[in-house]
Amino acid sequence: MIREFEGIVVSETPYSESSKIINILTKDQGVIGVMAKGAKRIKSPLRVATERFTLGIFSVYYHKDKLSTLVSADIINPLLNIKTDIVKIGYLTYIVELAHQTAKQNDDEHIYAILKSAILKIEEGKDPMVITNILELKMLDYLGVGIDLDKCIKCGSKTNILTISGDEGGYICSDCRTNELIYSDKTIKMFRLYYYVDINSITDLKISEEVTHNIDKILTDYYERFTGLYLKSKEFLKSVAK
């Protein structure tokens, strides 16, 4: 049975001299494995459309829980803005790997929707660090380690919130604060906004460098302590972002 899937190629593996196997994170079917016969040939119509990070519509002979076979593919957006900028490539590589690993643990269709929205906003020219941090924060729920942004992580108080700690895993009130770094009210408020904002609705980003870097640090600490994920693309991102 031929089925169409919207998705993004998250990995590709050579198979024989002329073919490859690709994994596609799809809109409504999680990650599917697909054989792309002849896709390594220079003149193959499947060659470009089966490259990693291709966002497209894929027609396949679909076999549930088995390797499917690619029939044709149409690119939704070539992502030329991202693919000509090494820093944006770093962010793209990271968020795709993060979404892929998250989808392995949770096949919720919102994972693909969030990833697609983030990619297209970076392609539009929005700050890649901000968009990536928003995606990171939203992915935590699907990884089963979401941050509680309603009360102090230590005592449960909903008042006198003083700061936020990635190491502790949430808000800290003035009564419970020991040696946690104190972040500005703007950082605390923007962190919460990151969680609730619809990425598709973002039209302008006016966030200070101090706030963006504070939020990035908080999320980095949180991921290292609570998710158990080690992504090589994160190290690559750190190197190119410098």
Image (tube, rainbow, N blue to C red):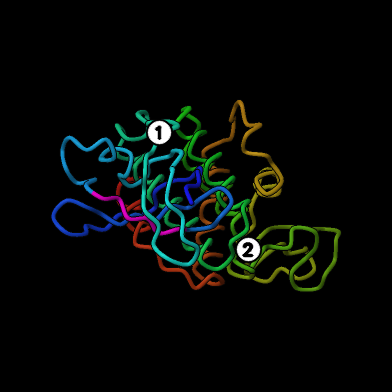
Query: x, y percentage for residue 182?
Result: 64, 57
Q: Which residue reaches farthest front?
A: 1
Is most of the magenta stretch helix, strand or loop? Answer: strand
- The three-letter amino acid code for the residue at tag 2 is Ser
Camera-nearest residue between 112 and 184: 112
Q: CA distance from mark 1 to mark 2?
A: 41 Å
Nearer to me, 64 or 173: 64
SS at badge 2:
strand
Residue 220 in the image, given as x and y percentages of width and height:
50, 60
- 10 Å neighbourhood of mark 2: few (<14), some, or many (≥20)? many
Location of residue 18 in the rendering, given as x and y in whole percent from the top left corner: 17, 51
Q: Which residue is mark 2?
A: 165
* Magenta part of the chain: 32-37
Q: Which mark is residue 75?
A: 1
Q: Secondary structure at mark 1?
A: strand
Q: Is residue 93 magenta?
A: no
Q: Nearer the viewer, residue 122 or 106?
A: 106
